[in-house]
Amino acid sequence: MPAWLSVILEILKFTIPALIVFITVHHLLKQYLNSQYQMQALAFKKENRGASTPLKLQAYERLMLFCERISIPNLLRRIRTHDMNVGTLQAALMIAIQQEYEHNLTQQLYTSENLWKIIQFAKNDVIQTVVSVGDSLDKAKSGDELANKLVDTVTKKELNPIEKAKQAIKQEAGLLL
């Protein structure tokens, strides 16, 4: 057997087992590091969930309060005075709704996109109701007439978007618990 062939066989005798050991160690180390990474990620998610859950619950509370505050009967109790005419009361209601919305705008960070769309739909429905009922009346008439017609309109609605929004808030908040 030539000398060069015996040298190559000697080299292969050491390198093949070393290569097999290297590949095995590399594979085992990679699996170990991946499992450690997954455990760290899980611990991080758990820690963050614990920190963000109270913020999300507070956001749901605030949105529930927002829905209560923009419901027409509650708006009228807070805003209406007996010396207001239709135009003044309508403007005051619109301003109050917009202020409530702006005050709670940041809560969308903690809610799903669908829930936020439901909240916006409820707000827009209340605004549309105030505008349509207010525009159907003479602006100089007493605000009591607008208030009575608004309450009648809301009670006659089959689908109350404020109630639907409250249900959606409860349902999404229930997913956290």
Image (cartoon, rainbow, N blue to C red):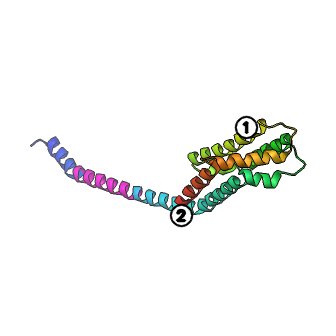
Q: Is residue 51 magenta?
A: no
Give the image quarter of residue 133.
top right
Please name the residue shown 32% across and 53% down the image: 27
Q: Give the amino acid at mark 1.
A: Ser
Considering the numbered disc 1 on the image, is that residue within a helix, a strand or a loop? helix
Decide whether the magenta segment is chiefly helix, strand or loop: helix
Label 2: how many Cα within 10 Å (few below 14, some 14–19, many 20+)? few
Q: Is residue 19 magenta?
A: yes
Q: Nearer the viewer, residue 32 or 165?
A: 165
Q: Where's residue 137, x and y in %?
A: 80, 37
Q: From where the camera sits, is residue 96 visible?
A: no
From mark 1 to mark 2, how far is it between C-alphas?
Answer: 40 Å
Q: Where's residue 39, x and y in %?
A: 45, 61
Circles 1 and 2, Cβ within 8 Å, touching? The answer is no
Q: From where the camera sits, is residue 11 visible?
A: yes
Please name the residue shown 40% across and 55% down the image: 34
Looking at the image, tell me whether mark 1 or mark 2 is earlier in sequence order. 1
Of all residues shown, which one is farthest toward the right?
A: 83
Location of mark 2 (residue): 177
Q: Give the amino acid at mark 2.
A: Leu
Q: Could you say which disc has been placed on residue 132 in the image?
A: 1
